[in-house]
Amino acid sequence: MDTRLLHTFTALARTGSFTAAAAELHLAQSTVTVHIRTLERELGTRLFDRLPAGALLTEAGRRLLERAEDVIDAVARLRAAGEGEGTVGGRVAVGTPESLCSTRLPAVIAALRTSHPEVEIHLDAAGTAECVEGVRSGRLDLALLLDDEADFPEVTTEPVASEPLALLCAPAHPLAARARPATWADLAAEHFFLLERGCSYSDELERRLLAVPGARPRLTRFGSVDAARSCVAAGLGLTLLPLTTVAEQLHQGRLERVPGPRFADVPVRLARHRRRWTAPAAQVFTEELVRHFSG
């Protein structure tokens, strides 16, 4: 069987769309259609129901999916074994929170370009749920999670570092000049600019603010660290962000840390599929990542 058909099958199962699968595989949509029809003809069964909303796996398709992924994984292992101990290369798709994408990972990728120039890293900035689903479905090879949670179906995680958090305001904000630390009651009266839902430390801060009796905090959610940071620097409210994302603004005096409750460091976890093989390119990325954080 042509393994290209299995790659097309798994992409369509993952995306649920002939158009999206074609874009992901860099194929014409008609080629995706031909691949699926050919595979269905070879197997003698219908794998997808074609619906107006997209392509939905049939029961036979669901049974085939895990086996197809196993075959693709086995072929990748064979190819790697055939290449021996030569140059490591290939594409690695990595999901990551936007904060790590803009602060930690550029140095990792720069180091890899020197040590392993044939390794191509593709970053996908996303929250925990999207990253975990990407690893589970095979869209992502690896993911970095800023999360205390470590138990996900089909996905295993390992801690590689931790990120300290900083509660922040503008220098002219009243909380910046207070002689005593802010209490939770003080904070619950403020306007906060937080990252979008699914960000573990933002969600935990919201939970603690709403737990204050009679609290009515104003909460604005953003998908961008820069948007939250800019609103706070303009004096519009407070935020909670990884310290690495605001080091420059603190040094320049555009932001100040708010004296108040202590926030535990948030773990950085490396996520991968429990069953899938880690290709050499993904392995060298992991090694460089651990080296960067430990350094």
Image (tube, rainbow, N blue to C red):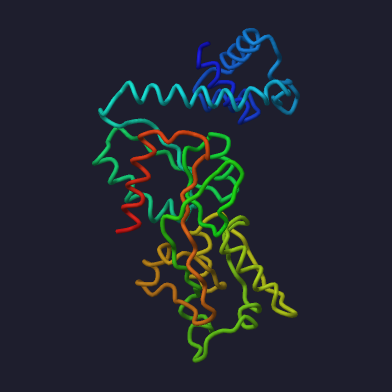
x, y percent for residue 239: 54, 69
Please determine whether, in this image, residue 73 is positioned above or below residue 137. Answer: above
**Quadrant hosting residue 250:** bottom left
x, y percent for residue 21: 58, 25
173 sits left or right of 102 in the view: right
Residue drawn at the location 58% of the way across and 45% of the way down: 130
x, y percent for residue 100: 44, 54
Residue drawn at the location 65% of the way across and 72% of the way down: 208
The front one of 147 and 75 is: 75
x, y percent for residue 218: 67, 70
Outermost residue on the bottom side: it is 179
Please determine whether, in this image, residue 80 is positioned above or below residue 187. Answer: above
Residue drawn at the location 57% of the way across and 73% of the way down: 237
234 sits left or right of 91 in the view: right
Q: How many marks?
A: 0
The front one of 78 and 267 is: 78
44 sits left or right of 112 in the view: right
**Quadrant hosting residue 245:** bottom left
Please determine whether, in this image, residue 93 is positioned above or below residue 148. Answer: above
* Quarter of the figure with the C terminus: bottom left
